[in-house]
Amino acid sequence: MEPEENPLFTLTIEQFKELTRNIVAEEVKKIVNQSQGVNSEFKNDNDTCFIAQACHITGLKKPTIYSKLSTKQIPSLSRGKPLIFSKKHLQMWIESGRPKTDDMNQIKLILQQREDQGGH
């Protein structure tokens, strides 16, 4: 009779150790396969990137990105390791924080008028 077929209380210590090793090995294989599937899913998606590329896209340094992530000021697809970002979401985030051209023209006009009035 194999260890899997015996009641637990009838197993020898060695049979119990072997059974435990087999169960742990099976679970580890499942976890590794699942994590490889997740990683390949992100690698195949051209829209996703990791922190180094997020720094390049945003022009921010890693500590700044970490700070903005902790206060949920910057979009991300994951908050754990590895940090995964959507390039499209980062670009939209950058564009949403930029003043519109009309607003910039109005600001320039106001500043120019202040300079013409004597620098106030």
Image (cartoon, rainbow, N blue to C red):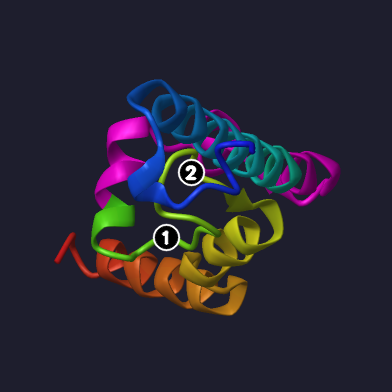
Which quadrant is home to the C terminus?
A: bottom left
Label located before the other in sequence (2 or 1): 1
The residue sitting at 50% across, 77% down in the picture is: 103
Majority secondary structure of magenta residues? helix
What is the three-letter code of the residue carrying label 1? Ile
Q: Position of residue 35 (x, y in %)?
A: 63, 42
Q: Residue furthest top?
A: 14
Region rendered in magenta: 40-67
Residue 41 colored in magenta in the image: yes
| C-alpha span from label 2 to label 1 | 12 Å
Dot 2: within a 10 Å radius of its alpha carbon, few (fewer than 14), some, or many (20 or more) residues? some
Which quadrant is home to the N terminus?
A: top right
Secondary structure type for disc 2 = loop
What is the three-letter code of the residue carrying label 2? Leu
Dot 1: within a 10 Å radius of its alpha carbon, few (fewer than 14), some, or many (20 or more) residues? some
Mark 1, residue position: 74
The number of numbered discs placed on residues in the rendered structure image is 2
Q: Position of residue 109 (x, y in %)?
A: 44, 72
Residue closest to the eye, 61 or 4: 4
Apparent side of residue 89 relative to residue 115 in the rendered image (left or right): right
Q: Which mark is residue 83?
A: 2
Apparent side of residue 27 relative to residue 16 in the rendered image (left or right): right
The residue sitting at 18% across, 60% down in the picture is: 119
Task: Give the mark toward the camera: 2 or 1.
Answer: 2
